Image (cartoon, grey):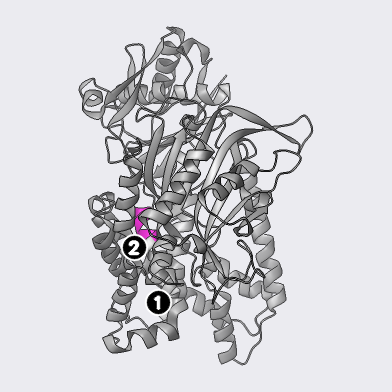
Amino acid sequence: MTTTELKEQYFKFFEDRGHSRLPSYPLIPENDPTALFTTAGMHPLIPYLMGENHPAGTRLVDVQKCIRTGDIDEVGDDTHLTLLEMLGNWSLGDYYKKEAIEWSFEFLTQELKISVEKIYITCFEGDQDVPRDEESAQIWQEKGILADHIFFLGKKDNFWGPVGQEGPCGPDTEIFYYVGQGEWNGSTCPGDDSGDFVEIWNNVFMGYQRKAGREPGQFEYLEMKQKNVDTGMGVERAVAVLDGYSDVYRIDSIWELVETVMNVLKVPEGDFEEFYQDHKKSLRILVDHLRAATFILGDERGVTPSNLDQGYILRRLIRRAVRHAKKLEIPQDVCISSYLGKATIDLMSGSYPELERNRKFIIDELFKEEEKFEKTLERGLKEFEKLERVTGQDAFMLFSTYGFPLELTEELSEDKGLKIDKLAFAEEFKKHQDLSRKGGEKRFKGGLGDDSEMSKKYHTATHLLHQALKEVLGDHVEQKGSNITAERLRFDFSHPEKLTDEEKQKVEELVNQKISEALPITIEELTVDEAKASGAIGLFSDRYGDKVKVYSMGEYSKEICGGPHVKNTKDLGKFKIKKEKASSSGVRRIKAILE
């Protein structure tokens, strides 16, 4: 089965059961300070999981492109990927456990023809916060899953969320496919390290809201009025299982890229298998990382390589890929980054047209970053040659400043007859990780479910700011991104130069004037064509479904948005711009507060 066939079969199955098909949302989340990338299909649906009405209804189906960076160091094994496609069916306060489980079972056994004997299930075992999920286990048994194929596991394995400190969450039931040798003998179980099981589907029953308790570190789990279903089936892993592969890189949408690399290396076709077995780790990392980098650059909110946030991850992916290209001895005259970027666009733009739209930008940025890294490597080699001995601190300096992996420094050291203190390097690396983690926890405190009144106010204020910028600077102003917390708003917009003090003052005064006019905030559900005709602003792109929500601030502002918002501009308080600076080429960034 191909990835396209699986996706289309899944869409048809759930559309036949009343689900509206949604497009894939951007990889870089909008208005979400809790994540650098979209890691699951639920990211863009947060307002609707919290009670907002979705214009497409209460039953939804989609395939979401996702970037997961927590396992970057695991990429190179049989199953881990940085970029993945996640199929999902959603219930927003509509059906719940019974329908979700029955449809999962039906799709797997009747549509995909998977034997019931190959299916194993895990459910939440319960704790002091949320009770044991006997209901899900009972439904699975009623469908024909044997009792000894059902396992109860704790929060670590069978409870989803929240992403931050607070937000929607709930128990999940995971579906595993048995890939072990011979018949299962009971000595292994889903979720262990045996390798006998591959997870192919997860049904999350998002029926709880986690709220901070009175004491630090204490939380309470409150039942949500609107109970939701959030499911996920990883396209790549599912296709690998269905096609009998334990190696996810063998599936159609990835293997073609592996073959592209071997063709660049002029490996005879008859030797592909042997070459792959001898060099699989480097081939996998090269293909995975540049596939992910292509999608990040091609996203409608695409970023460029940098030393911050998404740009840092992007740079790390490209540079790690280039290092493994060198291990494979890719010819010096081949820019493997742009070469694989082109191949990824050709292969995936049918499903993700933004890749073709941004083809030149993607290829140019990949070329520039690879060229820049080549120069950095040269400088690093010169720095290495100055060392008479290589301490752990030296090895970490080469890693953090010049991008040298430990194994490269080890190889160079061996050539000079030197040894590295790996323990000291590990200590330096751990310090770096701890600092990054602390910074991340500080930056991403809160959660995806932050529906506080202040967040709503800031969300509303971005609409007034957007329109005010258009009036003061011109119609060329377009939103390029935003990030909202309960403490401030951050708004990125297209503009070629720094704002003058006078321009900033005019924008500020205009926003405060509209706040003082107490404009009512209304909402309409329109088709995209109707929204355009009405004068609503927004990025009219593939991410919109048949209908969109249009929010109006009196007669002043009309914009496509998912919400949530306050009811009247008078509720916002006083708007104040705190900082205005460059975000990237041709893009400015404003940080503002409400007093």
The quarter holding residue 372 reads: bottom left
The answer to which of 29 and 350 lies nearer the viewer is 350
* Residue 392: x %, y % from top left: 68, 75
The quarter holding residue 400 reads: bottom right
- Asked if 533 appears above or below 584 in the picture, the reply is above
* Residue 215: x %, y % from top left: 79, 33
At label 1, which amino acid type do we have?
Ala
At label 2, which amino acid type do we have?
Leu
Image side of residue 439 versus residue 309, left or right? right
The answer to which of 100 and 67 lies nearer the viewer is 100
Seen as rendered, the residue at the extreme right is 215
Q: Secondary structure at mark 2?
A: helix
Q: Residue at x 64, y 68 (%)?
A: 188
The answer to which of 557 and 257 lies nearer the viewer is 257
Residue topped by disc 1: 325
The quarter holding residue 204 reads: top right
User: Main SS of the magenta segment?
Assistant: helix
Q: Residues within 10 Å of mark 1 (few under 14, many from 20)?
A: many
Whether residue 576 is visible here, answered yes or no, is: no
- Comparing marks 1 and 2, which lies closer to the viewer? 1
The answer to which of 327 and 250 lies nearer the viewer is 250
Q: Is residue 187 part of the magenta span, yes or no?
A: no
Image side of residue 274 versus residue 194, left or right? left
Q: Is residue 293 part of the magenta span, yes or no?
A: yes
| Screen quadrant of the N terminus | bottom left
Seen as rendered, the residue at the extreme top is 517
Determine the CA span between mark 1 and mark 2.
14 Å
| Highlighted range, magenta | 292-297
Residue topped by disc 2: 366
Q: Residues within 10 Å of mark 2 (few under 14, many from 20)?
A: many
Q: Secondary structure at mark 1?
A: helix
- Asked if 10 appears above or below 457 in the picture, the reply is below
